[in-house]
Image (cartoon, coloured by chain):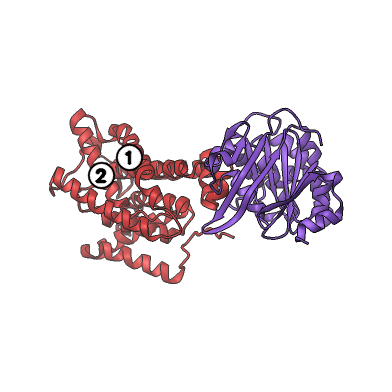
Amino acid sequence: MIDWFNVILQGVLVGGLYAMFAAGLSLIFGVMRLVNIAHGDLIVLAAYIALVTTEALGIGPLVSLLLVVPIMAAIGYALQRLILNRTLGEDLLPPLLVTFGLSVIIQNGLLTLFTADDRKLQAGSIDVATVRLFEGVYVGILPFLQFVVAIAVIAALQFIFYRTALGRAFRATADSQEVAQLMGLDNRHVFALAMALSLAVVAIAGVFLAIRADFDPSIGPARLIFGFEAVIIGGLGSLWGTFVGGLVLGVAQAIGAHINPGWQILAGHIAFLVILAVRPEGLFARVRG
Amino acid sequence: MSESLAPPLLAVRQLDAFYGDFQALFDLSMEVRSGEAVAVIGANGAGKSTLLKTIAGLLQARPEAIVFDGEPIGDKPAYAIAARGVALVPEGRRLFPSLSVEENLLLGGQLKRHGPWNLRSVYELFPVLGERRDLPSTALSGGQQQMVAIARGLMSNPKLLLCDEISLGLAPIVVREIYARLPAILAAGTSVVLVEQDIVQALKAAQRVYCLQEGWVALTGAAKDLSRETIAAAYFGM
């Protein structure tokens, strides 16, 4: 019994990371109907930027967030302004193709610069520190911290989206680009800000991914799939739904892995397919008129 | 007709406008002076909405074809024209469905141009909106949605408010109620262009009239000088 409790708890904690993968993806799709195929590779890019900053400056990975987050946000703004804005229009295919190309470019760029070797960020003593919740149940400080950060990220996005002028601009531009421009909003700038925010979240997700486990330039596409699955499970247009989607995926994977280590990824996909079959609109889809 | 010596707030000069290969406006010229209400009337497809969309920057033209406040703006994008003080109340209202009434208004005011209009003053102009400020904009009646669209335009404190068919689909009593607010808008220093098919309301509210016919100005003059017969002739091309 306590054994299963531990399994589910670990799944929940990993789920927070998946929710962070998904949040940036969901944000971009919601604001500009852009499906960012390079999302997973951008997460890995953030991990490598964190690797370089920690090694060059001798700082810990959590401190490196102070640099990695603004760097990724700047990359996001420039990427949107210089490339992705040109692909947006009635047709959904051009942004798909361009971000797919971007995914290939990032993977190969990282491979050339850093080789295919496994890397990992060292967080020092808290890397292995655990606390005992109660008899037989231990939680690693890092997974717990990562989970708390995931909640904070989702809450912050929720706040920005529904309580600030920036969020109003995002929602209005998503409703109608034409009318938003009549109100004085430059949609190219609004989209670039949305991508900057998305990649700021990607930066946080990338650093935690890199502390948790080994990474190499090829692991991006799998993170993209996890992100997609979490968004679809939770339902489009709901940030807390995305969070729950991440948890469902994390728990399913943990249960699969506990039954048979080879079933971890498979169990996640099965959970995704079951929910897609039973509730195609996702668990918490916001009905839009 | 006495001409003011001050340059007009808006001058449209020999404007040609196109939808792809289709030419919607031909060599069109018009003026709006400061503090004035001007009606643009005409049948369906006469080019009234095209004219407003071109002034607001949703359609591009030669730079000098549209001069606003002494500056050529014909080739400027819509958001830059809005920043200069032109607000379009689009046909069909086009509120943001994801936003509440008040959020629609705040978005209209996001340019933060200074002037008499803010949440408090537009709620005074349309008190019913204040009572419904937290509702989704889609939950309002057609007339109330039109009020939101006008108030949203005013929130940017425009020098020129372009109103596209504000009477469309509304009951006559509601149309009268909305038109009754027009003097307050003009008194606050905003000039207004009214595009209408309902010419009775437009003629009552405006000082001057342009009647369009298939993309041309068929008739122009002071509203009080034009008889129904001359307007009907220009309207239908008889």
A126 displayed left or right of B172: left
Which residue matches tag 1?
A75
Quadrant (top left, top right, bottom left, bottom right) of the C terminus of chain B: bottom right
Instruction: Identify the residue shown where x is 38% and y is 57%.
Output: A230
Q: Who's purple, chain-wise? A: B
Q: Which chain is red?
A: A
Subunit ID for the residue under disc 2? A
What residue is drawn where x is 61% and y is 31%? B70
Q: Earlier in the sequence, mark 1 or mark 2?
A: 2
Q: Position of residue A281 (x, y in %)?
A: 48, 65
Name which residue type carries label 2.
Answer: Leu
Q: Classify mark 1: helix, strand or loop.
A: helix
Q: Is residue A221 visible?
A: yes
**Three-letter amino acid code at the position of disc 1:** Ile
Q: Give coordinates of residue B131: x percent, y percent.
A: 74, 44
State left or right for residue A24 relative to residue A53. Answer: right
Subunit of mark 1?
A: A
Instruction: Find residue A259 and report its image quarter.
Output: bottom left
Q: Callout 1 environment at 10 Å: few (<14), some (14 to 19), or many (20+)?
A: some
Residue nearest the observer in this picture, B26 or B82: B26
| In this rendering, position of residue B152 left or right of residue A111 | right
Which one is closest to the eye, mark 1 or mark 2?
1
Q: Position of residue B133 (x, y in %)?
A: 69, 44
